[in-house]
Image: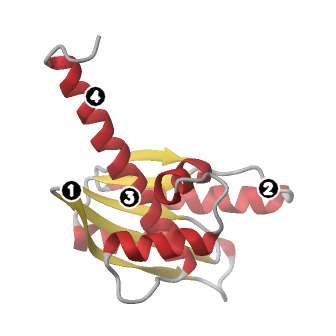
Amino acid sequence: MRVIGLDPGSRVTGFGVIEMNGTSFCHIESGNVRLSNLVLAERLHEIFERLSQVIERTQPEVMAIEKVFMARNAQSALTLGQARGAAIVAAVNHGLDIQEYSALQVKQAIVGRGRAAKQQVQHMVRILLGLHQPPPLDTADALACAICHLNTAQGSARIKSGIAVGMVP
C-alpha cells in the first residue's frame, strides 16, 4: 500500500509518500509546499495544485492527514482548516481514501509517547525510513502520519485475519 501523509499548514504544508515492503517502509518522495508571500486564496490554490502534482506523480492509494487540533487563536484554526480542505479536495479528486489521525495518535505510533517532541518524531522518522539526514519538521510530521496509517492498517489486517481463521473470539 502506498500512502501520502500530510501535515497541513497555510504557510508550509509537509508531505511524504511511503509504502510498505514486507515489514519495512520504503520512502518514495517527500517535501514541503512553502507559501509565504501569497494571499490566502492563492495559497489554498497552490496547496491544491502542488499536492495534485505529487499525487499524480507518486500514485498513492490513501491520504493520511493530521486532524485539526483546537488552537488558542480561532483565526489560525480556521485558516488551518482551509489548508486541510484544499489538500483533502486534491486527494478526493484523485480517488484517494482519506484517513485522519490526531497528533497524539501519530506521536504514539512513531515514538511510543503521545506527548513526544517534534524533534523526537523527526529522529524516529529518519531511523524508520533509513534516511541519511533528518527531514524538515513539517516533512517529518507528514511522513510520521503516513507511517502511522501503515502501522494502523497492518494491525487492522492482522486482527481481521485472526477473526477470519477463528483465532480471535
Q: Residue at x 24, y 26 (%)?
A: 160
* Location of residue 128 by image quarter: bottom left
Whichever of callouts 4 and 3 sits on the residue coming sooner in the sequence is: 3
Whichever of callouts 3 and 2 sits on the residue coming sooner in the sequence is: 2
- C-alpha span from label 2 to label 1: 36 Å
Residue denoted by label 3: 147
Residue 100: numbered disc: none
- C-alpha span from label 2 to label 4: 35 Å
Residue denoted by label 2: 71
* Location of residue 29 by image quarter: bottom left
Residue 23: numbered disc: 1
Q: Is residue 78 left or right of residue 146?
A: right
Q: Which element carries disc 2, helix, strand or loop?
A: loop
Tag 4–tag 3 contact (CB < 8 Å): no
In the rendering, at what x and y percent does residue 36 appear?
65, 86
Whichever of callouts 3 and 1 sits on the residue coming sooner in the sequence is: 1
Q: Residue furthest top?
A: 169
Q: Residue at x 42, y 89 (%)?
A: 133
Q: Of 116 and 52, which appears nearest the observer?
A: 116
Q: Residue at x 55, y 75 (%)?
A: 138
Whichever of callouts 2 and 4 sits on the residue coming sooner in the sequence is: 2
- C-alpha span from label 4 to label 3: 18 Å
In the rendering, at what x and y percent does residue 10 appear?
64, 71
Amino acid, disc 1:
Thr
Tag 1–tag 4 contact (CB < 8 Å): no
